[in-house]
Image (spheres, rainbow, N blue to C red):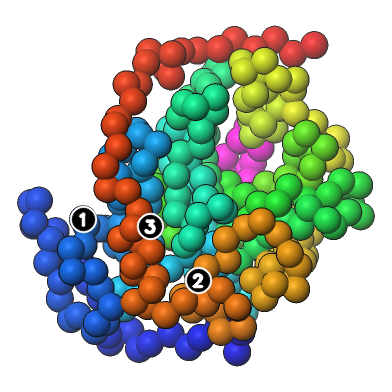
Amino acid sequence: MFCRTSLSLSRVLLWRSIGSKYSLTNLSSRYLARNFHPVRMSGNYAIVERGVPNSTDYRIFFRNEVGTPISPMHDIPLYANEAKTVVNMVVEIPRWTNPKMEICLAEALNPIKQDIKKGKLRFVPNCFPHKGYIWNYGALPQTWENPEHLDSATGCKGDNDPIDALEIGSRVAKRGEVLQVKILGTVALIDEGETDWKVVTIDVNDPVASQINDITDIDKFFPGLLKASIEWFKIYKIPDGKPENQFAFNGEPKNAEFAKNILAEVHQFWKGLITKEIPAPISCVNSTVADSPDYVPPEEANALLQKSSDGGVAEPITDLVDKWHYVHLK
């Protein structure tokens, strides 16, 4: 097997909060930090917040079911079932929010952090009538858009990131949550000359998930959302003085089968990345991938988490974050 076999779920590590107190039950890993920080569970994963929110020090780390720190990019499986009909999605940005949070490729264990622009925390503007992100936005683990690969469909190379996912269901997810989602289709954003696939998904637990299986089903239950999504990506950088984004295929979304083929390809690119067959300036530190030269044992992974900042100074959030921008396209 490509990944190490996970331990039995009977050894699951549970964090339970009681007010501001946190306790551990059924502890099975001797590699936990002596001084751990408040966490919350998302399925089999625990989210550990380090640093002060709204600061450049703020990070969200992940632990698996036995308490070992993991990379959300490398250690969470892409496929959530053997049939490969469901995939895992790491939520970076909940719907309606503006902070531009992302998996950090440069740092060990790839925590989620807020993007920095000109030395300041980055917020995505509200382009009327859209408020922040209009879906739960995140990344699909164990994927990588190879910047050296020329995509035959788009004619552009990859953007050097894990593939992006839009979760369109009715629930507003939490930052750092790991969702199991169905693949419905994809659109191909051409961002500064690079292919930036946006995979459209829905949480398998959404009330209408069983009735939506492909891109053509979306308008039956979420009328106008696909059109709004294309508009959002086209205009969201304009308030920052950049031109409107372009799309491959004239902005027409591709179906679920097409999207699944793209996922299979970028999953293979990730395998080349994690095994160092494809060199790239990305931290591949992980605690579960057997074939990786950057595998670290649980105690070392825990030490890396503990070295992260637990301080920082929160930046004031100005009224500009809530400002409406009225964008006129040419």
Q: Which secondary structure is most common in the magenta stretch?
A: helix
Query: Is residue 122 or residue 171 the one in the foreground?
Result: 122
212 relative position to 144: left or right: left
Amino acid type shown at disc 2: Asn
Task: Say few, some or many: other residues with alpha carbon within 10 Å of mark 3 (under 14 / 14 to 19 / 20 or more).
Answer: many
The residue segment tinted magenta is 216-227
- Look at the picture and state if 112 lies above or below 44: above
Amino acid type shown at disc 3: Phe
Mark linked to residue 38: 1
Q: Secondary structure at mark 3?
A: strand
Amino acid type shown at disc 1: Pro
The residue positioned 64% from the left and 34% from the top of the image is 229
Label 3 and label 2: CA atoms lie apart by 12 Å
315 relative position to 130: left or right: left
Label 3 and label 1: CA atoms lie apart by 11 Å
Label 1 and label 2: CA atoms lie apart by 22 Å
Image quarter for residue 301?
bottom left
- Look at the picture and state if 128 lies above or below 34: above
| Residue 325 among those drawn in magenta | no
Q: Kindly indicate whether the residue at mark 1 contacts the one at mark 3 (C-beta within 8 angstroms).
A: no
Residue hosting label 3: 61
Query: Is residue 254 or residue 77 the one in the foreground?
Result: 77
Which quarter of the rendering shows the N terminus?
A: bottom right
Label 1 vs 2, first from the N-terminus: 1
Tally of numbered tags? 3
Residue hosting label 2: 286
Query: Is residue 5 or residue 280 the one in the foreground?
Result: 280
| Residue 222 among those drawn in magenta | yes
Q: Secondary structure at mark 1?
A: loop
Residue 205, horizontal then vertical, whole percent: 43, 60
Residue 196, horizontal then vertical, whole percent: 73, 45
